[in-house]
Image (cartoon, rainbow, N blue to C red):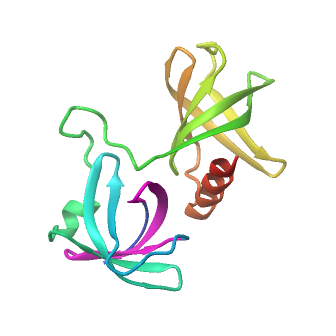
């Protein structure tokens, strides 16, 4: 089945995001910037904390084919449960980062650290707790890239945001490579 969706790909000590090209009960085709050896073990997450184990069956032109260790029904792979088995809300895969970003909120500029990111949102850490009255904010990447977001939760100086428009896999990949390089 042809799909365009973001997946978290873990191998060795590395984690990265990949774009799902297609999926079947026995395996998955992913577009990735990483290079792989045939037979390399990988872990794939389409939903955070639900990992699928497999091995690289082939690699060509930034695409890899992964054969799952166990067959999984396609509907189970692509379903997005509302809740995980432990009662937490299911989320799309996130990558851990630690990068400083400029934030515009309440007509003022401030800085925060991005702690994790997905195509739908991010976790930000501010120096001090922000005002509860704040509803929206803008993450400023550069002069031409600004990500509007809504605050979804706050615990002290940690804030979870949801992007008003999900960001493209290409932009997400660019942000992660930029933020991991800092």
Coordinates of residue 133 in the picture (x, y in percent): 62, 14
Can residue 30 be found in the magenta stretch? Answer: yes
Q: Residue at x 69, y 38 (%)?
A: 139
Magenta residues (range)? 8-32
Q: 126 and 56: which one is in front?
A: 56
Left or right: 63 in relation to 80:
right
Q: 73 and 31: which one is in front?
A: 31
Q: Residue at x 46, y 55 (%)?
A: 15
Q: Is residue 79 visible?
A: no
Q: Is residue 71 above or below residue 139?
A: below
Left or right: 45 in relation to 127:
left
Q: Is residue 132 above or below residue 153?
A: above
Q: Residue at x 15, y 69 (%)?
A: 70
Q: Is residue 99 visible?
A: yes
Q: Residue at x 59, y 54 (%)?
A: 167
Query: What is the quadrant of residue 159 in the picture?
Result: top right
Coordinates of residue 8 in the picture (x, y in percent): 42, 57
Coordinates of residue 49 in the picture (x, y in percent): 30, 46
Q: Is residue 115 above or below residue 60?
A: above
- Could you tell me which quadrant the N terminus lies in? bottom left
Query: What is the quadrant of residue 67 in the picture?
Result: bottom left
Q: 145 and 55: which one is in front?
A: 55
């Amino acid at each position: 089945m042809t799909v365009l969706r973001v997946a978290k790909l873990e191998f060795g000590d590395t984690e990265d995001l990949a774009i799902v090209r297609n999926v079947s009960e026995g395996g998955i085709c992913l577009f990735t910037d990483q290079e792989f050896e045939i037979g390399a073990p990988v872990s794939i997450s389409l939903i955070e904390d639900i990992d699928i184990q497999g091995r690289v069956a082939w690699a060509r032109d930034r695409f890899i084919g992964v054969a799952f260790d166990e067959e999984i029904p396609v509907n189970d792979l692509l379903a997005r449960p509302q809740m995980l088995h432990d009662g937490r809300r299911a989320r799309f895969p996130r990558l851990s980062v630690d990068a400083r970003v400029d934030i515009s909120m309440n007509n003022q500029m401030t800085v925060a650290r991005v702690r994790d990111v997905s195509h739908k949102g991010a976790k930000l850490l501010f120096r001090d707790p922000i005002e509860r009255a704040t509803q929206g904010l803008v993450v400023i990447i550069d002069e031409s890239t600004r990500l509007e977001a809504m605050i979804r939760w706050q615990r002290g100086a940690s804030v979870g945001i949801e992007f008003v428009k999900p960001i493209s896999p290409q932009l997400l990949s660019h942000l992660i490579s930029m933020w991991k390089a800092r």
